[in-house]
Image (cartoon, rainbow, N blue to C red):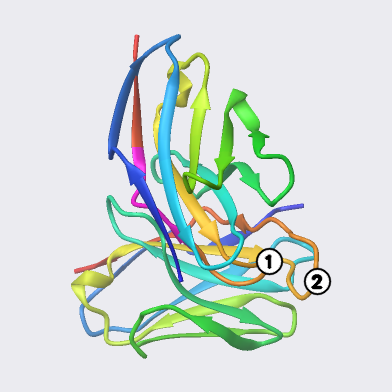
Amino acid sequence: DAGVTQSPTHLIKTRGQQVTLRCSPKSGHDTVSWYQQALGQGPQFIFQYYEEEERQRGNFPDRFSGHQFPNYSSELNVNALLLGDSALYLCASSLEGIREYTEAFFGQGTRLTVV
Amino acid sequence: AQSVTQLGSHVSVSEGALVLLRCNYSSSVPPYLFWYVQYPNQGLQLLLKYTSAATLVKGINGFEAEFKKSETSFHLTKPSAHMSDAAEYFCAVRGSNAGKSTFGDGTTLTVKP
């Protein structure tokens, strides 16, 4: 089991550009959550996808959007990049929709640098 | 609503000394609580979790944490620090089985030889 995999691992973009980050969840998981971790801070929740729909959203502008595919993988898209979008973007997968608690597993993250 | 406060952004201990990292939480529903460790340029690794079972939770690498509802705390401890414990530690709260986790700002643990 490869666990949660994210691609790419590092990315450099210019202000105003658009970026797409990808996440493959752990085998058997159906839910993907995205977090932004700025340098020296804790992860901040962006949104969560379940059954191909955005189920919850944090306090992030509409420039941040996502998608979940039928195979449960997910993409995070950020438009009109700002310098402040530079951060480590973490994907977490879990199995939801059941009563019992299940652990969320995190990927290694994508380091986005906006110049 | 849920929130986490980690007291002390930097903690320094000597190798072999007790490690104590503090976490206080706020949650409008019975919480799930977590401690994660993050090494430089890596993702988050779960150390331990509280899910309304035993209040004293044992995790990996010799870490443990005690859930104290009356104090709304979930402090992380380890009896004897090792050099390899030097990392960033995050406390997180989750208000339900599903949904987002809210993280603290992290505590950087330094272990001196």
C-alpha separation, residue under disc 1 versus residue under disc 2:
8 Å
Observer-nearest residue: B61 or B2? B2
Q: Amino acid at mark 2?
A: Ile
Is A61 displayed left or right of A69 in the figure?
left
**Residue A47 falls within the magenta-colored stretch:** no
For numbered disc 2, what is the local secondary structure?
loop
Q: Which residue occupies 71% across, 61% down?
A: A26
Marker count (numbered): 2
> Where does the magenta region start and end?
B102-107
* Residue drawn at the location 41% of the way across and 33% of the way down: B21
The answer to whether the residue labelled 1 contacts the one labelled 2, judged by CB atoms less than 8 Å apart, is: yes
Q: Is residue B92 above or below residue B16?
A: below
**Dot label at residue A17:** none
Question: Which residue is tagged 2?
Answer: A98
**Residue, x 28% and y 83% (percent of image)?**
A17
Residue position for label 1? B97
Q: Position of residue B12 (x, y in %)?
A: 30, 23
- Please state if B40 lies on the left or on the right of A108 as rendered: left
- Name the image quarter holding residue A82: bottom left
Is A61 rendered above or below residue A112?
A: below
Give, as a three-letter code, the residue at label 1: Asn
In this rendered view, identify the residue nearer to me: A19 or B5.
Answer: B5
- Chain ID at mark 2: A
> Residue A51 occupies which quadrant of the picture?
bottom right
SS assignment at label 1: loop
For the C terminus of chain A, the image quarter is bottom left
**Residue B63 at x, y = what percent?**
57, 28
Image: B102 above or below A72: above
Chain hosting mark 1: B
- In the rendered view, tell whether residue A22 sits above or below residue A57: above
Q: Is residue B42 visible?
A: no
